[in-house]
Each structure stands twice: as structure tokens, then as C-alpha cells.
Image: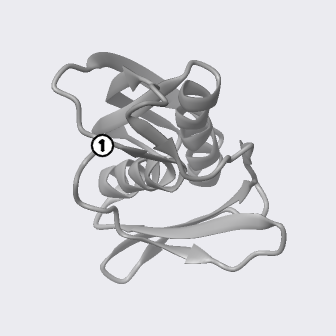
Amino acid sequence: MSTTAPDYTLLDHTADLGMRVYGTDLKDLFEGAGRALMHLMVKAEIPNKTHSMKISVSGEDLADLMVRWLGEILYLFSGENLVVTSIRMGSVSSSHLDATLETVPFEPEIHETLREIKAVTYHHIEVTEIGNGWEAKVIFDV
């Protein structure tokens, strides 16, 4: 995972966990959201050897795309036991994105689970253009 923390803030939300993430453009926003999710879930050392995988995600609109994108990253961690260490966005449109992820297998000896996130929710999901960039608000079921 990148040693630089992504640009996000945590939101107070009853019984759930929320974040607001920022980006200069859509690529930066979606990359930052993915990095923030991993930053919330696991503390990991940056390994020398990773596995590269390309993924494509489609959605009805930007909000749906964000939920599905973060859902893919969550699935890789909780379903496939993979830690995403790096994200390189390819293309991002209002309904589709392509990205390349670097992953390593989760190893309890070197990775520390910080919190369990069960799902990315549609509750209060927002992806909006702001004055000098983009902002997304996402709520997770914990």
C-alpha cells in the first residue's frame, strides 16, 4: 500500500463507518477511495513482490460505480484474502472504470487487520464535483 495516506476524513455515523474522500479528478477520486478503504481495513508493509490484476467495473452512474468499485476491493480482501497494495486507474467515465491493482496474499504475521468492513452501502452515497475537484461520501456496514 502506498506510504502516503489517501486524502479522506472519517464521518460520524451511528453503527456504521463513513468516509468523505477527495480527488482532483475522477481518476484521483476513485483511486483515493480505493486506497482509503484499504487504509481503513489493514495495516500492511509494502512487499517487494506483488501480483498485478486488471479489473473493470460498471455502474448506473458515478454513485453506483463508486459502490461497485469499493465492493470489488472489499471482496478481494474479505473473499479472496488479498491485500491491495497499489492502484493505477486506467479510464474512468460516469458509468465504467478500468484499473490495475497490485495485490499480495493476506498474511496475519505481517498484516494487521484494523477493522472489519462487511459491506459498502448505498446509504447516503454521494459523488459530486466541487469547485476544484471531486468529493465522495461513502458509508460502510461494519
Where residue 92 appears, x then y in whole percent?
A: 38, 42
Q: Nearer the viewer, residue 28 or 85?
A: 85
Q: Where is residue 32 in the image (x, y as percent from the top left)?
A: 37, 55
Give the amino acid type for the residue marked by disc 1 in the picture: Met
Asked whether the viewer can see residue 142, the reply is: yes
Q: Which residue is drawn at 35% across and 31% down?
A: 99
Residue 15, quarter of picture: bottom right
- Would you say 135 lies left or right of 98 here? right
Q: In this view, does 57 lie above or below 38?
A: above
**Quadrant location of residue 133?**
bottom left
Reading the image, the residue beneath label 1 is 1
Q: Nearer the viewer, residue 104 or 94?
A: 104
**Residue drawn 63% across the image and 46% down it:** 67
Q: Where is residue 31 in the image (x, y as percent from the top left)?
A: 36, 48
Q: Quadrant of the N terminus?
A: top left
- Asked if one can make out residue 124 in the rendered structure from this viewpoint, the answer is no
Q: In which quarter of the image is the C terminus?
A: bottom right
**As drawn, 27 above or below 111:** below
* Residue that sits furthest to the front in the current view: 109
- Type of colouring: one colour
Which residue is rendered at x = 31% and y = 55% of the image? 28
Mark 1 Cα-neighbour bin, 10 Å: few <14, some 14–19, many ≥20: many
Q: Position of residue 86 (x, y in %)?
A: 29, 37
Front one among 116 and 99? 116
Q: Which residue is drawn at 20% across and 19% down?
A: 49
In the rendered view, tell whether residue 74 sits above or below residue 129.
Answer: above
Q: Hey, which residue is sitting farthest left in the picture?
A: 48
| Quadrant of res 24 | bottom left
